[in-house]
Image (cartoon, helix red, strand yellow):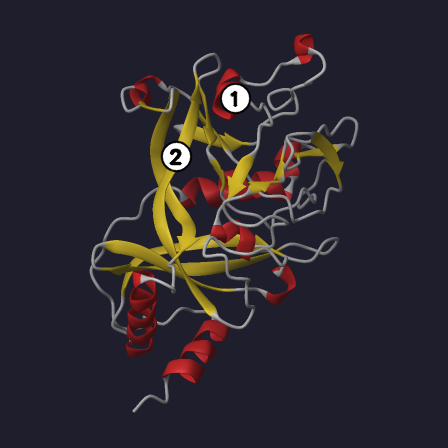
């Protein structure tokens, strides 16, 4: 767990002035990735939408940058690629993490080219929902039924997600990871106060009164040769602010840092497949239990 750290892009790493090329200090891989339009945008995942992002899935999204705590300023990149100022407690910007290996040499052998950009697949995370308008709908129905029957296999892993209304203390929820036919899925019920109105990758609007099954998929990172940093190709999640949760006024004392290096750092490490434990297979969430029993418990 100590071989890497997670952080956000700085304002300088994500800054391009279209009117003055001498002020272009953005990382080269980001310039190349978005050429010929250097807007430095990321696209959202379904999870980010479910966690309250402004933007729709698979579209350009607002995402957070590192704060300047000396000036008490917090920044984000908007969907046009411009750097804007935000409030510390704003939770609707997405999180596009930066992966910094303390020794990246071992991982460079796994780089691959995609449209001229060097990329790495490292770790995994719930990103997109099963499309219930297609074959994914059949899988989702099976997963719901098996969850009720307590016949799904848990991997032993739970993902940590932050949520909460702007200006209020952060809250945390955990979602259990399940295994079905060799693939991993996470059930997610929208937290009502995180409903941002964005639509999902299926083009459907979000409903706060239903369950979504998220597929756990590899994370793709863009590799910057000059800095040896890896930048997440997509904005993975939302719902995290910069509120100070510990004593002190440093970035390390913020909710964002705690999420990145206490929770997300662990969550992207792939789970091992463990022996099936049928003693308590229902998710610990009472909301999830009530939902499953209400919708599937009365079938004859």
Give the x, y percent position of residue 90.
Answer: 70, 47
**Which label belongs to residue 266?**
none
Residue drawn at the location 66% of the way across and 24% of the way down: 11
* Residue that label 1 marks: 35
272 to 278, vertically: above or below: above
Viewer can see residue 228: yes
Residue 99 vertical position relative to residue 159 in the rendered view, above or below: above
Horizontal and vertical percent position of residue 42: 54, 36
Which quadrant of the figure contains the C terminus? bottom left
Residue at 45% of width from left, 39% of height from top?
A: 265
Indicate the secondary structure of the residue bearing disc 1: loop
269 sits left or right of 250 in the view: left
Image quadrant holding the N terminus, namely top left
Do tag 2 and tag 1 residues touch (Cβ < 8 Å)?
no
Placement of 213 over or under 40, stated as above or below: below
Residue of label 2: 220
Residue 198 appears at what percent x and percent y?
59, 55
How many marks overall?
A: 2
Q: Residues within 10 Å of mark 2 (few under 14, many from 20)?
A: some
User: Is 274 left, or right, of 232 in this rendering?
Assistant: left
Alpha carbon distance from label 2 to label 1: 19 Å
| Frontmost residue, 277 versus 291 | 291
Dot 1, crowdedness within 10 Å: few (<14), some or many (≥20)? few
- Tell me which numbered mark, 2 or 1, is placed earlier along the sequence: 1
Identify the residue shown where x is 76% and y is 42%.
Answer: 87
Q: Quadrant of residue 88?
A: top right
Q: Residue at x 78, y 32 (%)?
A: 72
Q: Quadrant of residue 194?
A: bottom right
Q: Is residue 136 left or right of residue 32?
A: left
């Amino acid at each position: 767990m100590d071989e890497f750290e997670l952080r956000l892009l700085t304002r300088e790493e994500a800054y391009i002035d279209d009117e003055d090329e001498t002020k272009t200090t953005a990382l080269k891989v980001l310039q190349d990735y978005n050429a010929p339009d250097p807007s430095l945008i990321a696209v959202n995942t379904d999870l980010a939408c479910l966690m309250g992002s402004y933007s729709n899935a698979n579209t350009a999204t607002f995402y957070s940058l590192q704060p300047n705590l000396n000036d008490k300023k917090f920044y984000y990149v908007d969907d046009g690629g411009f750097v804007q100022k935000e409030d510390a407690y704003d939770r609707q910007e997405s999180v596009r993490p930066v992966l910094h290996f303390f020794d990246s040499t071992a991982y460079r052998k796994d780089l691959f080219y995609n449209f001229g950009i060097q990329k790495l697949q490292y770790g995994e995370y719930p990103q997109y929902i099963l499309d219930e308008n297609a074959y994914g709908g059949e899988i989702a129905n099976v997963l719901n039924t098996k969850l009720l029957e307590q016949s799904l296999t848990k991997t032993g892993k739970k993902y940590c997600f932050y949520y909460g209304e702007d200006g209020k203390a952060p809250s945390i929820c955990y979602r259990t990871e399940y295994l079905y036919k060799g693939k991993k899925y996470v059930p997610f019920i929208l937290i009502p106060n995180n409903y941002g109105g964005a639509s999902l990758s299926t083009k459907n609007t979000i409903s706060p009164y239903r369950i979504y099954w998220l597929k756990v998929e590899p994370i793709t990172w863009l590799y910057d040769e000059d800095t040896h940093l890896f930048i997440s190709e997509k904005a993975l999640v939302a719902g995290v602010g910069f509120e100070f949760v510990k004593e002190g006024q440093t970035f390390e004392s913020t909710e964002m840092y705690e999420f990145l290096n206490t929770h997300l750092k662990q969550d992207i490490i792939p789970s091992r497949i463990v022996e099936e434990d049928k003693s308590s297979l229902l998710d610990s969430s009472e909301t999830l239990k009530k939902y499953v029993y209400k919708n599937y418990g009365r079938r004859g």
